[in-house]
Every structure is written in C-alpha cells, then in structure tokens.
Amino acid sequence: MWVDQTNHFAYLEPLATLPKYRGRGLAAYALVETMKRTKSMGATMCDGGSNPFYNKLGFKPHLKRQRWNKTDF
C-alpha cells in the first residue's frame, strides 16, 4: 500500500496469496495490518478495487470512477 497524502487515500496495489496458502486468512491479515499503518500516516480511506475478497471482509463501495479516453485527435 501507499498513501496519497493530498487525498488521504491508501491505495492497495496487487495483494495476492499463492493458491496453496489461500483460505488461511493471510491476505486479510496483511490488508488489515497495512491499513493500520497507512491510517497512522494520515489515510482516511482505502482503495482496493472491486474484488469480491473485499466484500467478504465487510468493505463497501464508497465511490465509482469512470475512465475516459480520447481517441479522435
């Protein structure tokens, strides 16, 4: 994770567990521990994507983004 100090967001960039270690709570522990650390750095929200993993941990969507591209210059 890293913290955007301007917007007070903690961004999670790839969180993964090897298949043979899944289901042991390792990813959840890593996420919660890292969130505690980024909170102490000023983060007030966490952006982790839209994976069902986050729903299982009780996370709820806070905002929805749209990506725009200009293709005709």
Image (spheres, rainbow, N blue to C red):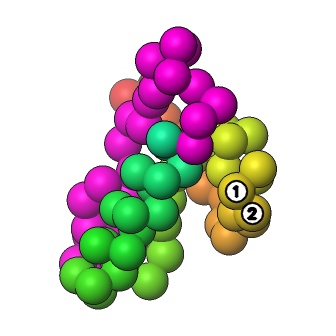
Q: In which quadrant is the N terminus drawn?
A: bottom left
Whether residue 36 appears in magenta in the rendering, the answer is no
- Mark 2 residue element: loop
Residue at image position (38%, 29%) is 73
Gap between marks 2 and 1 measured at Cα: 4 Å
Q: Which residues are magenta?
A: 1-25
The residue beneath circle 2 is 58
Q: Residue 5 at x, y = what percent? A: 23, 78
* 31 relative to 13 in the view: left or right: right
Disc sitting over residue 57 in the figure:
1
Q: Residue 56 at x, y = what percent? A: 76, 50
Whether residue 12 appears in magenta in the rendering, the answer is yes
Q: Is residue 63 visible?
A: yes
Q: In the image, is residue 41 above or below residue 16?
A: below
Q: In the image, is residue 62 above or below residue 42?
A: above
Residue at the limit of the structure toward the top, as seen here: 20
Q: Main secondary structure of the magenta part?
A: loop
Query: Which of these two is toward me, 30 or 2?
Result: 30
Query: Which of these two is toward me, 67 or 50?
Result: 50
